[in-house]
Image (cartoon, grey):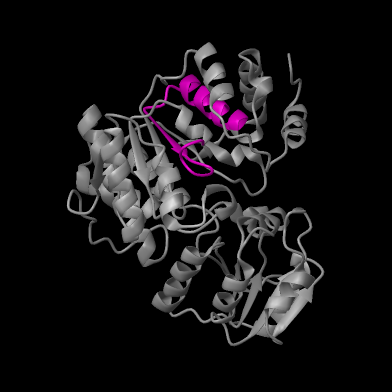
Amino acid sequence: MFFATYEDFEAHLLKLGLFHMDLAHSRIDAVLEEAELKRPDYPAVQVVGTNGKGSTSSFLSAFGQATGLTVGLYTSPHFVTPRERILINGQMLDEEEWCDVANDVMECGGETLTYFELLTVMAVFFFSDYEVDLAIFEAGLGGTHDATSAIERDLVVFTPIGLDHVDVLGHSIEDIARDKAGAMRKGLTAITHVQEQSAMSVLKEEAKNIGAILLKAEGTVTLPQTSRIGLTGQHQKDNALLALGAFRQLVDMYGWTPADIMDWDDVKEIGIADAWIAGRFQHIAATDSLPNLYLDGAHNVPAFDVLTATLKETGTEPAAIIFGCMENKDIETLAPKVQSLTKGAILLPQFVQMNRAEPAARLAEQFDDRTQVCESLQDALTRSKEIAGDKPVLLCGSLYLLAEFFALYPEFLQR
């Protein structure tokens, strides 16, 4: 036995290092082949892109559950515990199960795997153990070398592609799109929706070269005129349409039918309404210790453009912004976008849990004289409540900043 307790397993993860990457499929291939799960014994979908992967995956999971399927969902990163990354019908699994499956993976050679590879393989094992009807794997970084691309899949879903992780994937949208297109395989169906023309051109070119089948969701499905959507913003309607187009392809492949008491209109309505993921323009009403708060994981230029549109669409005018980001971000480009979102104060907390965060004092050099450096996120939250009163405060810039918030207030991790 490799791990006697879940704490032993978490200690092993920490030792592997959250940001350690070794871009190759040989290790994960060997473990999956040893477990006879290179071709999982369930339908598998991979979701690849720059922005919207988590939301699109959540919509796709919700459509499956509304149909009556057992759905496994693998996403990243997590906020408080790695157990958030692997869900069965939206529910985390207990620590004892995690320990058992981690030991199973290790017995198949898992000691060679990186942090992300280990969690990816554990998801494959979990979904087999639970005999899911559908498994959804959100890619971590890129497509060509991502661990999720080692899994034999039935469908690849491409969310919007933009500039991010340029130090790894390339300095142009074309380069990044080409890397993500590496998730395609000969004869494999892929589907996309909203893309910049340069990214779409690359996807089409690579699909032709590889012999993959590339479809567009628009025109194959339509969203119902529902009055309720689980995630806010026009971009979420686009994510929902892409997820619905993907689900339609899977239905055609596998002949799934809704439960006897439902029809496809019900499935679409319920799926769109029930989809939810923390930190995507998430509203938290004011409390004694918190301001009227909006949380958003926007962390790159395309995501901030979407966030700007959502604020305008919803009529939300932040009286203050709490912002932080990782040190590898293009701060000179992001700072003006952040400043344009408010006429009020900009609070820059020092990260407590993430040593790869840009130091608040150095970040302040890119902002104007409305800026305040805060010793911690709690300090920033307290100050923002004093500044904003009942008006909204926006917390954004990094999913890891949101992780620090959820570590302080875990009750808001669930809807």
Residue 205 picture quarter: top left
Residue 373 can be seen in this image: yes
**Residue at the location (50% across, 20% down)?**
129
Give coordinates of residue 269: x percent, y percent: 28, 52
The quarter of the picture where residue 411 lies is bottom right
Toward the viewer: 315 or 343? 343
Q: Is residue 336 above or below residue 247?
A: below
In this rendering, the answer to whether 303 lies above or below 70 is below
> Can I make out residue 259 in this image?
no
Q: Residue furthest right?
A: 375
Q: Is residue 127 magenta?
A: yes
Q: Residue at the spot x=79%, y=72% of the render?
A: 361
Does the stretch in magenta take in 404? no
Q: Which of the pair 88/206 is nearer the observer?
A: 206
Q: Residue at x 68, y 57 (%)?
A: 409
**In the visual, does 295 lie left or right of 198?**
right
Residue 240: % across, % down: 33, 53
Name the spot of residue 319 as percent of width and height, x first.
60, 83
Left or right side of 62 for 347 = right
- The segment highlighted magenta reads 117-145
Q: Position of residue 351 (x, y in %)?
A: 76, 61
Q: Give the farthest residue toward the left.
A: 219
106 vs 130, left or right, is: right
Please tell me which residue is depicted at 61% across the width and 19% down the height of the picture.
Answer: 105
The foreground one among 255 and 36 is 36
